[in-house]
Amino acid sequence: MKKNNILISPSILAADFAKLGQEIVAVDKAGADWIHIDIMDGHFVPNLTLGPEVVSSLRQYTKKLFDVHLMTMPANNWLEPFAKAGADIITIHLEAESNVKESLKIIKGLGLKAGLSIKPSTSENTLKKYIEYCDLILVMTVNPGFGSQKFMTTQLEKIRNIKNMQKRLDINIDIEVDGGVNKETSKLCLEAGANVLVAGSAIFSEDAKNYSNLINSLRNHN
Ligand code: DX5
Ligand code: ZN
């Protein structure tokens, strides 16, 4: 059963890169809400993934929202290329731009949802200046750069504090969690106040016929 207030965004970083189109079709059919696409530049993070041309070529495989997580420094020069490639949400890192407010405005000006992410070492207090310009806050529960890392439970308090910030300000934003999210840690994230869960290895490391069960196991906890 699908709980409609919880959104699952499979991270294709853990998918089979030789058949990305088919992998996207498979998670779409299995009940994914969004498709999480990690863009790494080998500079902001010590890993390199893919560029706008690849995103553009994947656009034909699903109508689900493309949730683009930009781990590039700077971020601004990539906003328009990824918007043109078919992104629906672009999330930038607070640590990667000096004028974050301006970047968020550019994303919205391109007609997209604007997200802001912080690394585990960055305090949630830094978000206060920007939260009203955001549609989404992405809390990293691993150090960005690689999949299959261990979930940092120290970040749960951060999720709770952001949820309280949202309630206090009475604003409508998504709180997304990324890194080490699996059947067990997803429950902790939801309890802390998150409503969007990114999961890479917890979904794509198994056979495609299990994607639906795996996605459901992130949403439903008995
Ligand atoms: C890490 C990426 C994540 C990653 C998550 O920098 O932002 O989206 O793919 O992978 P798992 O779910 O395996 O931790
Ligand atoms: Zn990500």
Image (cartoon, helix red, strand yellow):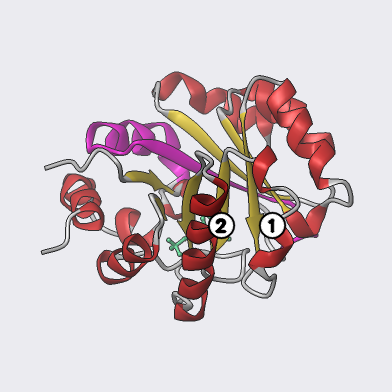
Residue range of the region highlighted in magenta in the rendering: 17-45
Say what amino acid the circle numbered 2 marks. Answer: Met
Q: Is residue 163 above or below residue 36?
A: below
- Amino acid carrying label 1: it is Leu
Q: Are marks 2 and 1 in contact (CB under 8 Å)?
A: yes
Crowdedness near tag 2: few (<14), some (14–19) or many (≥20) residues, C-alpha within 10 Å: some
- State yes or no: residue 12 in magenta: no
* Pointer 2 or 1: first along the chain: 1
Image quadrant assignment for residue 52: top right
Instruction: Report the quarter where the C terminus lies.
Output: bottom left
Crowd band around label 1 with a 10 angstrom C-alpha radius: few (<14), some (14–19), many (20+)? some
Q: Is residue 70 left or right of residue 175?
A: right
Q: Position of residue 2 (x, y in %)?
A: 17, 41
How many labels, in total? 2
**Residue highlighted by disc 1:** 127
x, y (%) of residue 61?
Answer: 40, 23
| Marks 2/1: CA–CA distance | 10 Å
In the image shown, does 15 or 197 lie closer to the viewer? 197
Image coords of residue 129 (percent x, y): 75, 52
Q: Nearer the viewer, residue 80 or 97?
A: 97
Q: Is residue 40 one of those drawn in magenta? A: yes
Q: Is residue 162 left or right of residue 60?
A: right
Left or right: 52 with respect to 7?
A: right
Q: Secondary structure at mark 2?
A: helix
Q: Is residue 50 visible?
A: no
Read off the residue under disc 2.
Answer: 165
| Residue 218 against residue 208 in the figure, above or below | below
Residue drawn at 50 percent across, 23 percent down: 59
Residue located 57% across and 33% down the image:
89
